[in-house]
Image (cartoon, coloured by chain):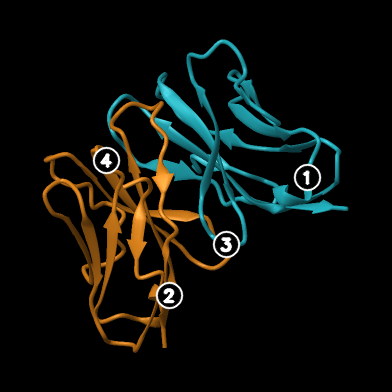
Amino acid sequence: GAGVSQSPSNKVTEKGKDVELRCDPISGHTALYWYRQSLGQGLEFLIYFQGNSAPDKSGLPSDRFSAERTGGSVSTLTIQRTQQEDSAVYLCASSLGGGSSYGYTFGSGTRLTVV
Amino acid sequence: AQKITQTQPGMFVQEKEAVTLDCTYDTSDPSYGLFWYKQPSSGEMIFLIYQGSYDQQNATEGRYSLNFQKARKSANLVISASQLGDSAMYFCAMREGLAVRQFYFGTGTSLTVIP
């Protein structure tokens, strides 16, 4: 697609429920990233995928968070047993590849509210 | 130590004036890239400008320029002839090395352009 697509754009869920957030990167982009942005805060790195390599999960805040990327394209971020502190905007980004000159293209984010 | 430091939580500028948003970074890797992103109230992250660590000249993109002072490890964003539409959060980010790696983001500067 022309840009990074994320769905849903907004999600309200009850505490304790599981949620799945989806990211469809730009076609041909081999690298995919998930970030979290809490209200008034900067971006917190969660996880990234590069091609067929094992993902870097070093930013996942707890074992309730997991992500997968199928076929080197679409990615799903899953949060189990959601807590109120999980409320944030979850941003997905993709880039053409490695190297420090490659910038990200971000999606519009999923605003998650846990009530 | 913080990888990216933005010390100005909020800035005001008169319309048509120039404004400088500060960013300092910390890395021991000789190869890195520096980026600025704009995040309007709608939430999307918009790429503005990139500076590579080996670039000899300061990057410019339209009204945006990056004042790169390598020895001081600073990468300030200069916006010339400010417009009302420039009101947004601005994030400085860094990517280290040659492999695909996460970006490190600062905490952002909120810019308000006054008519």
| Looking at the image, residue B76 lies above or below residue A25 | above
Nearer mark to the viewer, of 2 and 4: 4
Mark 2 and mark 4: span between their CA atoms? Answer: 25 Å
What amino acid type is highlighted by mark number 1?
Answer: Gln
Mark 1 and mark 2: span between their CA atoms? Answer: 33 Å
Along the horizontal axis of the image, is A78 left or right of B56?
Answer: left
Question: Disc 1 on helix, strand or loop?
Answer: loop
Tag 4, which chain? A
Q: Colour of chain A?
A: orange
Residue drawn at (28%, 54%), measured in percent from left and top?
A24
The verdict on a common chain for dots 1 and 3 is yes
Q: Which residue is mark 3?
A: B42
Mark 3 and mark 2: span between their CA atoms? Answer: 17 Å
Q: Which mark is residue B9?
A: none
Residue drawn at (57%, 62%), measured in percent from left and top?
B42
What amino acid type is highlighted by mark number 2?
Answer: Ser
What amino acid type is highlighted by mark number 3?
Answer: Ser
Q: In the rendered structure, which disc, 2 or 4, sits on the residue that comes first in sequence?
A: 4
Residue B93, percent across and down?
A: 50, 39
Callout 1 environment at 10 Å: few (<14), some (14 to 19), or many (20+)?
Answer: some
Q: Which residue is mark 2?
A: A87
Mark 4 and mark 1: span between their CA atoms? Answer: 34 Å
Q: Are marks 1 and 2 in contact (CB under 8 Å)?
A: no
Q: Residue furthest top?
A: B56
Q: Which residue is mark 4?
A: A31
Nearer mark to the viewer, of 3 and 4: 3
Nearer mark to the viewer, of 1 and 2: 1
Q: Colour of chain B?
A: cyan
